[in-house]
Image (cartoon, rainbow, N blue to C red):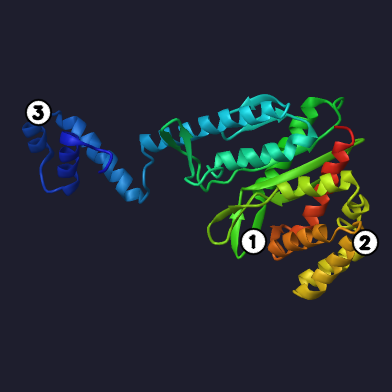
Amino acid sequence: MSSFEGKSREVISRILKGDEDLGKIASEEGLDEGNLRKAKEFLDKIISSKKVPVSISYHVSISRALIISALRDIKCIEESNGVVIYAGGDDLLSIAPVSSAIRIIDESRREYGGLKGQSRFHKLNNYLIPSMGDAGRSYSLYIAHYRYPLYAVVRDSASKLEMAKDSIWVDGRERKKDSLIITYSARGSLESSILPLSLRNPSLSLVDLEFLNDLIERVRAGDISVRLLYEASGGDFIGTAERAWRMGNMEIFDKVIEYIVERHIRNKEEILAEIKEYMKKYGKLRRYNPDGEEPFFLNLFKSCRLLYSGLRGD
C-alpha cells in the first residue's frame, strides 16, 4: 500500500478489503470495472504467493548505486595506470599493473558498499545516494604475461570468479559471495589462492587487504626474506601449523607461525608484532569447500607469494 498515493491508495484499499462489489466501486469512482477486476486478480496473486514485490523505486535505487559504483571504479583504475574494458556497477573488467591490483580491488570494494565514509552513502555535493550496503561483490585477479592470449585470460578469470563466489567464510557467522581469487599464470601452469573481502562479526567489516601490499613492500625492501612467502605457503613447518590449527591448539599454532616468521626477518621486532597481530585477528577464520575446510592463513601467504611473483614482471 505504501507505493500508492491519493485516490489510487483509497481505491486499492477498498479492493483489498473485499467487502464491496467491484461494480459499485467502479461506478462511484468513475473507473472501468474490467480494469478493477484485473487489478484485484493481480493483487490476489501477489498475496497468495506470500512474496513482497520489488517496487520501481527499489529498482531505481539499485540502478543508481551501481552507476555510481561503476563511475568510482573507472576513476580508481585510471588513476592507477589501468585500462577499463567494461564497468557496469556489478560487473567490472580491466587491465592494470600488478602493483596497483590490490589497491584497486580494495578501493572498489569499499566504494561498492559505501564503506569509504561513515554514512554508507555516496555523496555528490549535498545529495546522498544509497550504496549497495551489505551486498557482497567477488573479484578475480588474474596475473598473466602480456603476450598471453587475452581471450584465454578472460575465459579463465571468469571461471575462477565462480570459485570465489561459491566460497563460504566462517568466523562466528557465515559470509558468502564476497571473496577475491588471485590466479598466477606462469608458463601455462596456474596457481590460485582465495581471500575473503568481508566478515560479519556481528556487523559487516572489510578484511584488511593492504596488509598484503605492506608485507610485499617489506620483502622488496629487504626487511623480510622472500623465502618467508614460500615457506609459509607450503612445507613441513606450515604443515605443522595447519595440524595444530585443525586440532584447535592455538598456542602451538602461534608458536610455529612465530618461528617461521622470525627465521626470515632481519631484526625487525615491529614487523613480527604486526604479522602476529594480523594472524591473531583472523586466526580462526576458515573457508568451507567441497573437500572440507581451509584456514585463512594458508591463503594469506600464498596470495602474497603469487602477487610477488607477478611483480617481478610488472
The residue indicated by pointer 3 is: 30
x, y percent for residue 313: 89, 33
Observer-nearest residue: 246 or 30? 246
| Callout in the foreground (2, 3) | 2
Is 286 above or below relative to 250? Answer: above
Number of numbered markers: 3
Q: Provide residue 158's location: percent of width, then percent of height.
A: 71, 36
Point 50% across, 41% down: residue: 132
The quadrant of the rendering that contains the C terminus is: top right
Q: CA distance from mark 2 to mark 3?
A: 86 Å
- Residue 289 position, x and y percent, is 71, 57
What x and y, as percent, mark residue 10? 15, 40
Q: Which residue is mark 1?
A: 170
Q: Which residue is mark 2?
A: 263
The three-letter amino acid code for the residue at tag 1 is Val
Residue at the spot 80% in from the left edge and 46% down from the top edge: 192
Disc 2 and disc 1 in contact, CB within 8 angstroms: no
